[in-house]
Amino acid sequence: MMATNTLNNWTVEAVLEESFRNAVILQEAYICEVLDKKCTSTLVKEVPKVFPMLQHRHLRRVRTKDGVMHILICLASQVKDINSVFELLKLSSINIECLGPPELHKVSDSPPLTRAQFIEGSQHWPSSFHEDKQLERVLKGELFPIEDLKRIEQHMVEAIKMAEIARSNGYYAMGVVVVDPSDDEIMVKCHSLCPVDASNINSVELHPLQHTPMIAIDLVARGQGGGIWKYDTNKFYCKSNPTKAHDKEGPYLCTGYDVYLTKEPCIMCSMGLLHSRIGRVFYGEASKEGALGSRYKLHVQQGLNHHFKVFRGILSNKCKALEMS
């Protein structure tokens, strides 16, 4: 399942966390028919005290199907065997006369993240679900309206132009454009400074950190009155507006900005984009060592203090052709 939009023979795909696409994992649990429905409220209150399911709070305790009510007692892993179920309930003074015999039943092991997972899991046992409407639109392929797709294409065209300039000057054909989506203003346009043939280049001139996205971040800093590297200003475009740092939302260099890259960034550059608090990344060509969808999915890695959206495939054929020509 891919979340995609298509325009002019290219398709944009949202690079999502794998958990959104995963099938529902099931595990066994013990349920009992509620023979006396007058006991339901007491059972719902008392059973969780005996068998708390803190990691499975998404599961409803009671299900009514075809006029028959069942209560979820516990996970099979919580008891030694089926005989232990009633033994433990008796110790807590729960009236087991209200219940039919325990029986094994399948339930979902984790909360549903999507409506499709919710529907699949509910076929076995009901659960709670809080729908993310934006995510559901993405999963349906409703990523962008046509006008947004046109703007995305235009910005990638500018990135490709930068890559072509790089290639004509003996550098690797990689281009980047940074855009403030609040007003669709281009903040930075730059290209790779890594020469295809470095044999005649003084090693002092080759900076190991000057990958194309890192240059773009530094140029954003320059536009806000900072920056650390020196460049030939005729090669790149940098919107000089120090007040932008104070006007835009957020305290970081690229808070909320969009980045357009002709090629998927490596792990170092992806971390640079993360630390600068980029909002969205669009790239054309995937990379075997890429960190935003190919080898890793850094942008959705749990434990990191920032996450951002990633879309790939924009003018992919033209981006791939840059390295072939």
Image: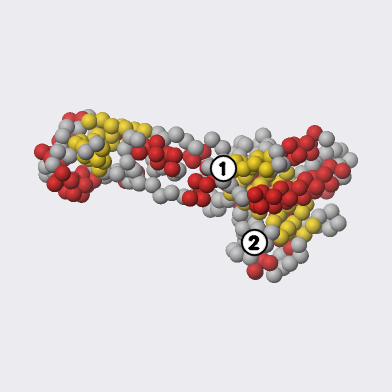
**Relative horizontal placement of residue 117, taking residue 222 as reference (left or right):** left
Residue situated furthest right in the rendering: 200
Which residue corresponds to the image point at 59% horizontal and 63% vertical from the top-left? 250
Find residue 23 and report its horizontal and vertical position in percent.
Answer: 44, 34
Image quadrant in which you'd find residue 58: top left
Residue 253 appears anywhere in the view: no
State the scheme by which the image is colored: secondary structure
Residue 239 appears anywhere in the view: yes
In the rendered structure, find residue 14 and report the number of the disc placed on it: none
In the rendered structure, find residue 141 and report the number of the disc placed on it: 1
Image quadrant in which you'd find residue 55: top left
* Amino acid type assigned to the residue bearing label 2 in the image: Ser
Find residue 9 and report its horizontal and vertical position in percent.
Answer: 70, 38
Sequence-wise first label, 2 or 1: 1
In the rendered structure, find residue 182 and report the number of the disc placed on it: 2
Which residue corresponds to the image point at 44% horizontal and 39% vertical from the top-left? 116
Q: Few, some or many C-alpha atoms within 10 Å of disc 2 (few <14, some 14-19, many ≥20)?
A: few
